Image (cartoon, helix red, strand yellow):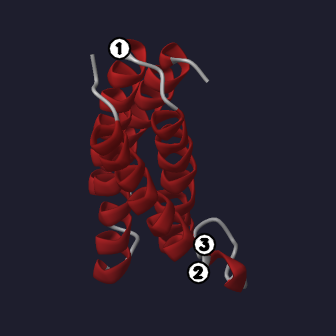
Amino acid sequence: MNYRKIILFAAIFGGTSVILGAFGAHALKEILEETQITSFKTGVSYQFNHSLLLIGIGIMYKLRESNFLKYAAICCIIGMLFFSGSLYVLSCKEIIGLNNIAFIGPITPIGGLLLVLAWVFVAVNFAKKEIV
């Protein structure tokens, strides 16, 4: 993975978080219950915030390649897919016709753990190396 791919993923996740946020605020507001909307908004918020983290990781990786930053990027990407993606599916499961998808629930905390690991890898990178 190189810095361009990391920043490309960040841009894709950031852009889709804006689209999904608007979709949730307008189209889903009339369809979903308040708890489902709250869950959907949590997914959007985490996706957007971690897109910013991913941009930072990409910039740091360009300045100095590091396995810690590579692992941080991978954890961040997969973590966003698992955490936010599972919240989107769980919030909208009735709409998309997936009422009996019990396996999605445990994916959310796995995604959260991967997001935490991304932050840990960034911290370890700074604890062990100079950035420039």
- Which residue corresponds to mark 3? 107
Q: CA distance from mark 3 to mark 1?
A: 33 Å
Q: Is residue 63 above or below residue 117?
A: above
Q: Is residue 56 above or below residue 73?
A: above
Mark count? 3
Q: Secondary structure at mark 3?
A: helix
Instruction: Please say whether residue 70 is visible from this viewpoint.
Output: yes
| Figure quadrant of residue 97 | bottom right
- Which residue corresponds to mark 2? 105
Q: Which mark is residue 103?
A: none
Identity of the amino acid at label 3? Ile
Please name whichever residue, 68 or 24, is drawn nearer the observer in this view of the structure. Answer: 68
Mark 3 neighbour class, 10 Å CA radius: few under 14, some 14 to 19, many 20 or more: some
Decide which of tag 2 and tag 1 comes sooner along the chain: 1
Q: Which mark is residue 63?
A: 1
Residue drawn at x 27%, y 55% is: 25
| Figure quadrant of residue 131 | top left
Residue drawn at x 48%, y 18% is: 3
Residue drawn at x 72%, y 85% is: 100
